[in-house]
Amino acid sequence: MIRDKLNSIITTYHSLITKLQHLSGVAPLAIRIYLFLPFYLAGSKKFGAMDNTIAWFEHSLELPFPELMAYLAATTEFVGAFLLIAGFATRFIAIPLMITMIVAAVTVHWDNGWYAIAQSSDPEVGNRLEAARSILQEHGKMDWLTAKGSFVVLNNGIEFAATYFVMLLSLLFTGGGRYTSVDYWLNKRFQQQ
């Protein structure tokens, strides 16, 4: 009796999983949509102030060949954003974007630990937040400053770079996604020939 019930549950589960395979492109699509904006904005910002980007790469980050590296990073992020959103050459573009995230994590964020935003439960962060709020309430426009969100202490840790890296790693293995990417339709077209 229990064995028959268990077999029925397993059969139902496998039937459901088989039907869900047709929706397997939804997760890669969601990742691609999510990653579009941060990469597009990062690439656009670098291109929009290329002299500043080169100077930052050279003096603050101390990267070799700062001009080349700045153009490579900006191009990878900007073009990569559009390739990701279309799901075109997804696996290919995931690799240089992952390298960009490793460089960002190591050169920009590493010394700041994990969190992108400092944890307010940390007593030091809590004290700094309270002091900043007090100063702003007395001398600033606290209501205006917090109208679009809470006041936080930016920690600038590796959290976002690591998260984007993991998402790109997933796309490296899954590709752009079934039905939802140019890659899928090109592959389907060439397999028929």
Image (cartoon, rainbow, N blue to C red):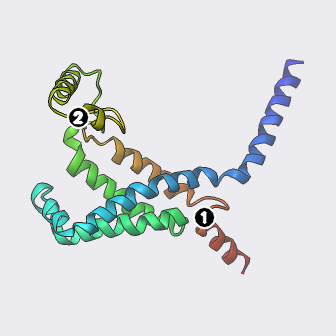
User: What residue sits right under mark 1 in the picture?
Assistant: 181
Taking the image as drawn, is residue 82 in sight?
yes
> Splitting the image into 4 quarters, where does residue 68 fall?
bottom left
Q: Above or below — where is 71 with respect to 162?
A: below
User: What kind of residue is marked 2?
Assistant: Lys
In front of the other: 52 or 193: 52
Given the current orientation, which residue lies at the most extreme bottom position? Answer: 193
Taking the image as drawn, is residue 114 in sight?
no
Task: Report whether 21 appears left or right of 182.
Answer: right
> Splitting the image into 4 quarters, where does residue 114 fall?
top left
* Residue at point 48%, 52% (across, down): 34
Relative image position of residue 27 (x, y in whole percent): 59, 49
Relative image position of residue 80 (x, y in whole percent): 42, 66
Number of on-image labels: 2
Separation (CA) of disc 1 from disc 2: 47 Å
Question: Dot 1: what SS?
Answer: loop
Task: Report whether 108 appears left or right of 36.
Answer: left
User: What kind of residue is marked 1?
Assistant: Ser
Residue 107, disc: none
Relative image position of residue 47 (x, y in whole percent): 27, 69
Relative image position of residue 180 (x, y in whole percent): 63, 61
The local crowd at label 1, few if under 14, some if 14 to 19, many if 20 or more residues have their Cα within 10 Å, is many
Name which of mark 1 and mark 2 comes first in the sequence: 2
Q: Above or below — where is 72 with respect to 98?
A: below
Q: Closer to the observer: label 1 or label 2?
A: 2
> Splitting the image into 4 quarters, where does residue 75 fall?
bottom left
In front of the other: 101 or 8: 101
Residue 141, disc: 2
Question: Dot 2: what SS?
Answer: loop
The local crowd at label 2, few if under 14, some if 14 to 19, many if 20 or more residues have their Cα within 10 Å, is few
